[in-house]
């Protein structure tokens, strides 16, 4: 049983400093902002996303040649406009499970010469009409930084090296010259590279033990860095949290073996409300935070023995996270239409809480990629005639547009609840959380502006809260953005927007401002403190 109160950083300090009991909430809940209690800089790469060759994410999603809504390159312009609203900082490509049986050479060169392959991860045919260069064209349009994953399942370390040569070397060797023949004179200069995907999972093609994976990743990374020393490498951390698995053993081995080599460790997590237990579901991002703390401890210990040669310590990349449980049967996980999850308001609250968790751990979480961008467990959903924005789109957009700067260690005093034993997702290990605050809060400071993100987990009760500045005073009007809907199961659809972002202003100045957070809501407040 995990006690969230014990995990909260600075709790004992705050109880002494502010002179109240953490277990005895005041008449109003309280959020205390101390500008001196800094966690770390919020890396914009936590607002990343993911494009995999899966279902209708690529074909029929971002790329739909022949559709009247697409441009001359086949890119859906309505989708592109919606994508731009998310300010996606870093986009992972091309997988995912897909990459473990993917040869990048199939997806470059004249389209008429590209082979059609049996795609084994998601049981479909891959036409390879969209590949490296098409993705890079799209990445430029959406103003995102690319993050490529190499095949360390069925692929070789040489294939990985050659891909870096194709994308990053200006001229001279064979694959750099091949890129130029394909019409791309200048290199793509892809900085971030993942050494395989979910290699701890038995479902992965070419699945390896932790020890064997570390050996292969080390050698692939060596060749890739010899080709372009400027790249950043991401090791595949734990994704297998099924009963009987030992994910922390995997993380410990990979961190220890690659402590001098990689720049990030990738972690994955999907959650779902499989038991229709609202309060447990909206608390599930706290399990991600618990796992973050465990892995951070492993990294900290390994860094005491590492020879990093002046490099930063290893950081954490949550490069797959989302809600995924409805479309997870054998019928809904394969073919051309797969994983087309439809999201409701409670899902949007979980996404906002994931983002809060990344900000609260800004010192170590430097990359996050929500999976995925369009149609496949995604914030944007299309048909041939248009699209709609799913509920989860709205917190993603608000955070990416506004929550930047320095993460603050905020003290929150609100009523709490216990979840009891619950399922995190289909087949996953179970969890049991104690003292979960109804208010889930993060804050950032950017100049004299403070951004406060608050999820009110309470299903029925609005929570009146005193927001206090430990030093200085609030000045001017507050901007307030609220994501909410009629009830927790509210959903959007084509021609129907039930869950949206509403904006308003709040008058207030001095050291305390009181605000009532509506039930089942996510609220962002922009304030200035002087």
Image: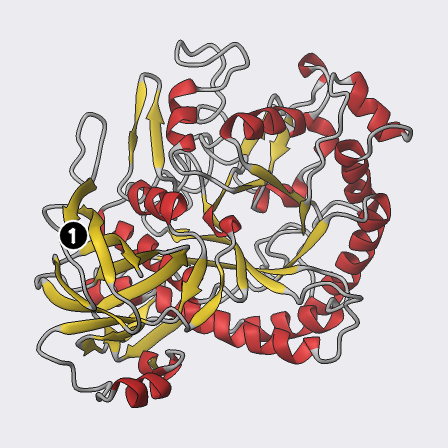
Quadrant of the image for the N terminus?
Answer: bottom left
**The one of 436 and 63 positioned closer to us in this rendering:** 436
Residue 153 appears anywhere in the view: yes
Q: Is residue 164 left or right of residue 390?
A: right
> Element type at marker 1?
loop
- Height in image: 306 above or below 518? below
- Could you tell me which quadrant the C terminus lies in? bottom left
Up-down relation of residue 244 to residue 158 (above or below): below
Residue located 9% across and 62% down the image: 462
Residue 439 as seen in the image, left or right of residue 149:
left
Residue lying furthest right: 172
> Crowdedness of circle 1 by 10 Å Cα count: few (<14), some, many (20+)?
many
Q: Residue at x 55, y 14 (%)?
A: 73
Where does the image place residue 267, in percent across and percent down from the top left?
54, 61
Which residue is rendered at x = 35% and y = 26% of the image? 382
In the rendered structure, the answer to whether residue 340 lies left or right of residue 282 reads: right
Looking at the rendered structure, the number of numbered marks drawn on it comes to: 1
The residue closer to the viewer here, 63 or 526, is 526
Q: Which residue is mark 1?
A: 488
Residue 129 percent coordinates (x, y) = 61, 21
Tell me if residue 388 comes above or below residue 351 in the rendering: above
Q: Position of residue 393 (x, y in %)?
A: 32, 41
**x and y percentages locating residue 329 in the rendered image:** 38, 47
The scheme the figure's colours follow is secondary structure
């Amino acid at each position: 049983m995990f006690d969230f109160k014990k995990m909260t950083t600075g709790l004992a300090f705050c109880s002494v400093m502010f002179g109240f009991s953490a277990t005895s909430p005041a008449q109003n809940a309280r959020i205390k902002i101390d500008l001196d209690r800094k966690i770390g800089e919020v890396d914009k790469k936590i607002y990343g996303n993911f494009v995999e060759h899966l279902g209708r994410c690529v074909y029929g999603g971002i790329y739909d040649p022949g559709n009247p809504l697409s441009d001359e390159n086949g890119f859906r312009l309505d989708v592109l406009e919606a994508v731009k609203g998310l300010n996606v900082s870093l986009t992972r490509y091309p997988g995912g499970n897909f990459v473990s049986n993917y040869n990048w050479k199939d997806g470059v060169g004249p389209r008429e010469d590209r082979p059609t392959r049996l795609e084994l991860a998601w049981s479909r045919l891959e036409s390879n009409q969209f590949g490296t260069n098409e993705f890079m064209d799209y990445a430029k349009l959406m103003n995102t930084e690319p993050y490529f994953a190499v095949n360390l399942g069925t692929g070789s370390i040489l294939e990985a090296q050659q891909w870096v040569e194709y994308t990053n070397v200006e001229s001279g060797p064979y694959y750099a010259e091949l890129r130029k023949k394909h019409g791309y004179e200048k290199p793509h200069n892809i900085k971030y590279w993942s050494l395989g995907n979910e290699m701890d999972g038995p479902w992965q093609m070419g699945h390896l033990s932790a020890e064997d994976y570390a050996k292969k990743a080390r050698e692939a990374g060596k060749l890739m860095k010899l080709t372009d020393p400027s790249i950043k490498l991401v090791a595949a951390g734990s994704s297998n949290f099924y009963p009987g698995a030992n994910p922390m053993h995997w993380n410990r081995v990979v961190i220890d073996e690659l402590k001098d080599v990689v720049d990030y460790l990738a972690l994955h997590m999907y959650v779902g409300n499989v038991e229709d237990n609202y309060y447990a579901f909206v608390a599930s991002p706290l399990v991600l935070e618990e796992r973050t703390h465990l892995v951070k401890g492993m990294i900290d210990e390994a860094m005491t023995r590492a020879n990093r040669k002046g490099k930063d310590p290893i950081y954490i990349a949550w490069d797959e996270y989302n809600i995924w449980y409805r479309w997870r049967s054998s019928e809904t996980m394969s073919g051309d239409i797969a994983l087309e999850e439809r999201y409701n308001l409670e899902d949007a609250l979980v996404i906002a809480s994931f983002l809060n968790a990344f900000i609260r751990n800004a010192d170590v979480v430097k990359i996050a990629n929500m999976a995925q961008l369009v149609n496949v467990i995604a914030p944007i959903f299309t048909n041939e005639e248009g699209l709609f924005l799913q509920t989860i789109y709205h917190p993603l957009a608000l955070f990416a547009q506004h929550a930047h700067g320095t993460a603050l260690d905020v003290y929150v005093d609100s009523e709490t609840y216990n979840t009891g034993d619950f399922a995190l997702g289909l087949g996953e290990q179970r969890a049991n959380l104690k003292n979960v605050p109804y208010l889930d809060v993060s804050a950032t400071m950017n100049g004299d502006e403070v951004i406060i993100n608050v999820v009110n987990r309470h299903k029925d009760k609005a929570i009146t809260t005193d927001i206090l500045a430990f030093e200085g005073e609030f000045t001017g009007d507050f901007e307030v953005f609220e994501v909410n809907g009629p009830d927790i199961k509210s959903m959007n659809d084509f021609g129907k927007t039930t869950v949206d972002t509403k904006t308003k202003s709040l008058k207030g100045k001095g050291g305390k401002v009181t605000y009532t957070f509506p039930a089942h809501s996510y609220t962002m407040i922009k304030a200035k403190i002087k």
